[in-house]
């Protein structure tokens, strides 16, 4: 007997057009597939140092598993507000910053509204846009980063939302403070601009902006950040946004109750209170990123200059084969076909020993 199948036509039109987000392959999955036991994952831009030891201590001392977490995240918000110089009424907590990006689309985009973002941008932007029936307007990048001039020219009467990743994932390029400020001055006040600063902590360039300070000046600005990268809490899924009190109030009206679990709240608070761990993580990242750049230069491999914790390298028409051979060596990097970059691989910086193994693997397959 043939089983009944639920008709796709019953889903919202935007959902039917989507492809599921494809995360980096877990090391455990590769080990199961190939029967190996020493895989390293350099695919998902995680902090190879993991989280601060003080986070582990805080989690182990948490004894409130049987009750719901604080839905308002009072302790974490208070700690964030003190660190960032904002009011708690400007903070929205999310199950990762992806959750906040989804909230923004749900609040501001109606079917037929236009959402602008750059080519080579984070795949979540088109996903949340189309899920709510929005129209994705993809502008051309310049030097693998958002071209703000093209984005400004793309604004129409139907534009409701603009996503800008700074620095950009998966390319690692960034937009300067002066260019962003000029852009904010010309964008109409009724259009919401999201500055996705997931890799903020890694950037040391002098002309890179700290846009949270702009949220009082620009009522249409939302800045999102995460604890998944430099803080090493990717597995606990927690991020946040800073915006005007009015926008924050709207986001919190659609935010699911208890969208951030109790362990994540405790862990994120402890992570903020150990800035030394982030500083050491950033220092190690810069050292290993410099090694990766030097390796590419020595081997004649092209790359996109990056200020984040990854490097996108130009591996040419053999990219699929190179990736497959690296997998058989137990080395997981990120192919970028989904970003319309079929001849590039994105490589996350790892610990020194992991980078040594990567270099040995790349030498043998390039």
Image (tube, grey):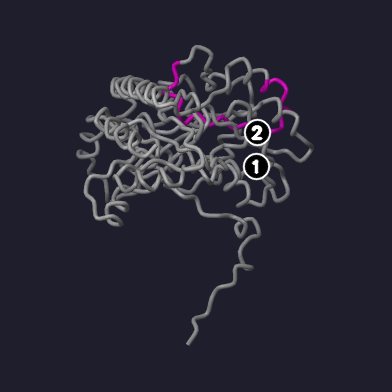
Residue 267 in the image: state x and y as whole percent: 31, 35
Query: Magenta region: which residues?
Result: 183-204
Residue 33 in the image: state x and y as whole percent: 30, 57
* Residue at the image position 75 percent from the left and 29 percent from the top: 153
Residue 43 in the image: state x and y as whole percent: 39, 40
Which label sits on residue 192? 2
Residue 276 in the image: state x and y as whole percent: 29, 20
Examine the image and state in which quarter residue 235 appears: top left
Instruction: Give the side of residue 14 with respect to residue 91, left or right.
Output: right
Q: Is residue 294 above or below residue 153?
A: above
Instruction: Give the side of residue 48 with respect to residue 146, left or right.
Output: left
* Residue at the image position 64 percent from the left and 55 percent from the top: 14
Q: Dot 2 surroundings within 10 Å: few (below 14), some, or many (20 or more)?
A: many
Q: Does the magenta stretch include residue 85?
A: no
Q: In this view, does 201 lie above or below 320?
A: above
Mark 1, secondary structure of its residue: helix
Mark 2, secondary structure of its residue: strand
The residue at which mark 1 appears reads as 108
Q: Is residue 51 visible?
A: no
Name the residue nearer the viewer: 12 or 338. 338
Q: Is residue 184 magenta?
A: yes
Query: Mark 1–mark 2 contact, CB under 8 Å?
Result: yes
* Residue at the image position 39 percent from the left and 22 percent from the top: 298
Q: Dot 1 surroundings within 10 Å: few (below 14), some, or many (20 or more)?
A: some
The span from disc 1 to disc 2 (Cα, nearest Å) is 8 Å
* Residue at the image position 62 percent from the left and 46 percent from the top: 129
């Amino acid at each position: 007997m043939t089983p009944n199948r639920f008709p796709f036509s019953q889903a919202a039109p935007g959902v039917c057009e989507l492809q599921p987000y494809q995360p980096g392959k877990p090391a455990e999955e590769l080990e199961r597939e190939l029967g190996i036991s020493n895989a390293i994952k350099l695919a998902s831009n995680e902090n190879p140092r993991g989280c601060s030891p003080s986070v582990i201590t805080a989690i182990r001392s948490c004894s409130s598993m049987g009750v719901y977490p604080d839905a308002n995240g009072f302790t974490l918000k208070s700690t964030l507000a003190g660190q960032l110089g904002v009011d708690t009424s400007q903070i929205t907590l999310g199950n990762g910053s992806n959750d906040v990006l989804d909230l923004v689309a749900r609040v501001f985009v109606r079917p037929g509204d236009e959402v602008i973002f750059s080519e080579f941008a984070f795949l979540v932007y088109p996903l949340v846009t189309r899920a709510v029936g929005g129209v994705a307007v993809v502008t051309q990048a310049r030097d693998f980063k958002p071209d703000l001039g093209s984005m400004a020219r793309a604004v129409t009467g139907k534009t409701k939302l603009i996503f800008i990743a700074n620095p950009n994932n998966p390319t690692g390029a960034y937009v300067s403070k002066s260019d962003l400020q000029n852009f904010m001055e010309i964008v109409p006040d009724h259009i919401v601009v999201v500055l996705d600063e997931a890799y903020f902590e890694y950037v040391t360039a002098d002309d890179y902006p700290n846009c949270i300070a702009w949220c009082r000046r620009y009522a249409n600005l939302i800045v999102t950040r995460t604890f998944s990268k430099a803080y090493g809490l990717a597995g606990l899924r927690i991020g946040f946004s800073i915006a005007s009190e009015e926008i924050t109030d709207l986001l919190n009206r659609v935010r699911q109750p208890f969208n951030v679990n109790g362990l994540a709240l405790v862990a994120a608070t402890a992570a903020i209170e150990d800035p030394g761990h982030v500083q050491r993580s950033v220092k190690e990242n810069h050292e290993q990123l410099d090694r990766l750049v030097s390796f590419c230069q020595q081997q004649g491999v092209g790359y996109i200059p990056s200020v984040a914790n990854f490097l996108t390298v130009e591996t040419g028409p053999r990219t699929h084969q190179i990736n497959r051979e690296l997998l058989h060596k137990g080395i997981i990097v990120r192919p970028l076909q989904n970003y319309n970059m079929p001849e590039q691989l994105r490589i996350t910086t790892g610990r020194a020993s992991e980078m040594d193994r990567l270099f040995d693997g790349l030498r043998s397959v390039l």
